[in-house]
Image: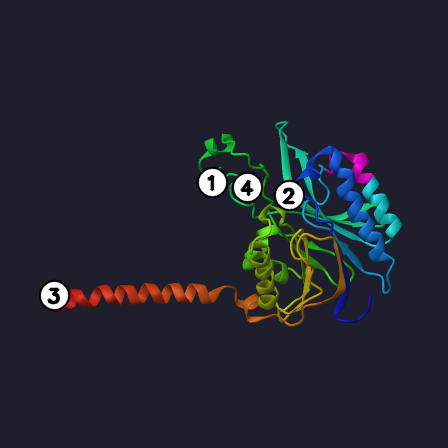
Amino acid sequence: MRRGSRERRSSALRGSASGSKWDTLHQERSIGTLARLTSEAVSREPKPDLVVWPETALPFYVRLEAQKLDRILELVRAWNVPLLVGYPDATFSLSGGVITHNAAGLMLPSKTIAAQYEKIHLVPFGERIPFQGILPFLGKLDLGQAEWTPGTKPVVFPFRDAPFGVLICFESIFPGLARDYAVDGARWLVNITNDEWFGPTAAPRQHADMAILRCVEEEMGMARCANTGISMLIDPLGRESKSSPLFQEAVVVGDVVLGGKPTLFRLWGDWLTGLCLGLVLVLTLLGWYRPLRRDR
């Protein structure tokens, strides 16, 4: 780590796991691949300040399977480098039901989880049937989707003098969430995702491009870690570096540039969209009003 600088060294690791990682028999292989790549990354000099694994890299409910979680925390202790990793989490409600989240946590060498963020923007029909709050019967539909519970607030992860915000999967398309992180004090962003569903299409590239826009809007760097997709580092000007190929194991190591002065977007928000909508409304009304005057 370069203390006092505007950069932090990050390692984004991708094991190129398939959907079979959810099977108990394949969990060990999937996690073992990421652990092997991590051991390689932390053995390099300079040593990374943070290691990043993809969305749902731990394919089990961490709060319900303490023994498996303890094994991961023991690895983090041995590496002596913090790990940002995606996983499912579950808690019990007061009524006895189970509340599940698509989450990301910062694991420390002290064998603790310093902070956790629960994904707010869930993929419609993939991670949750939308509009259940308005039409409760939709919650009974089973289209083969997951049924996560959305998170309630963004969480800025404390990390030395470089706190960061996490965007899970397609949350990189939401400028408001990245702005919330910046307003709350984040100095850089992390995007973890599982792009295995896209297959060999243009979608992984398109998905990665969305993350670039968030960096430019907030003028801060990002580490992006994608299972089978494009893992890369992005600077505050939207320039890519150290990007990985599709569907291959990869270790991306490099420096992430921290954000500096607030941008206009951070200060004012998405005012341009509102202005454009207002102009469209005014012009529409004028176009409607003038023919009425001529008819008189």
- The stretch of residues the image draws in magenta is 62-70
Element on which disc 4 rests: loop
In primary-sequence order, the first of circles 3 and 2 is: 2
Question: With respect to residue 132, does 48 lie above or below?
Answer: below
Residue at which label 2 appears: 102
Image depth: mark 3 or mark 2 in front: 2
Q: Position of residue 3 (x, y in %)?
A: 82, 69
Question: With respect to residue 89, does 191 lie above or below?
Answer: below
User: Does residue 54 belong to the magenta stretch?
Assistant: no
Quadrant of the rendering where the N terminus is positioned: bottom right
Pointers 3 and 1 in contact (C-beta within 8 Å): no
Quadrant of the rendering where the C terminus is positioned: bottom left
Element on which disc 3 rests: helix
Q: CA distance from mark 2 to mark 4?
A: 12 Å
Q: What residue occupies the far front of the structure in this picture?
A: 200
Label tally: 4
Q: CA distance from mark 3 to mark 1?
A: 45 Å
